[in-house]
Image: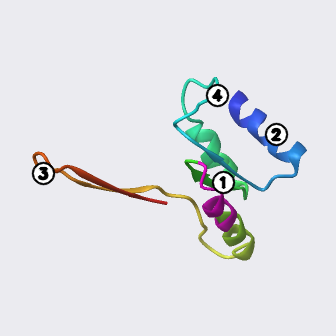
Amino acid sequence: ARIELGMKRFLEQGGFHAFTTTFEDLHGLKQLPGLAVQRLMQQGYGFAGEGDWKTAALLRIMKVMSTGLQGGTSFMEDYTYHFDNGNDLVLGSH
């Protein structure tokens, strides 16, 4: 809860409507703030992983455009794994 409140305060004070995180640099956090991110997206903030600011901005735009409509928009990270002995592959996408 403290992480979420701190993130929301930072976003509000900066006038930001979208943000990103990255697993490569937690900057003092013990783990990615997954639950906080989900709750902030529920409140209308745009988000994307790995510093993908374009997707975060697009999600915010989609949230604004869909205001008042049933359903919603959110960020999802898709991964497809191909396990083949000696030829393992991962296809990731935002």
Range shown magenta: 51-58
Q: Nearer the viewer, residue 64 or 16?
A: 16
Q: Name the residue under label 3.
A: 84
Residue 70 within the magenta-colored segment of the rendering? no
Q: Name the residue under label 1.
A: 41
Question: Residue 94: x percent and y percent?
Answer: 49, 60
Amino acid type, mark 1: Met
Secondary structure, mark 3, is loop
- Mark nearer the viewer, 1 or 4: 4
Q: Mark 4 points at which residue?
A: 27
Residue that appears at 52% across and 36% down: 24
Going 54% across and 29% down the picture, which residue do you hit? Answer: 31
Instruction: For mark 1, give the secondary structure.
Output: helix
Place of residue 70 in the rendered image (x, y in percent of width and height, measured from the top left): 63, 74
Q: Mark 3 or 2, which is nearer the eye?
A: 3
Whether the residues at callouts 3 and 4 have beta carbons within 8 Å, the answer is no
The 10 Å Cα crowd at callout 1, few under 14, some 14 to 19, many 20 or more, is many
- The residue at the point 58 percent across, 40 percent down is 35
**1 over 20 or under it: above or below:** above
Three-letter residue code for mark 3? Asp
Upstream in sequence: badge 4 or badge 2: 2
Check disc 2 and give the amino acid type: Phe
Q: Which of 87 and 14 is in front in this view?
A: 87
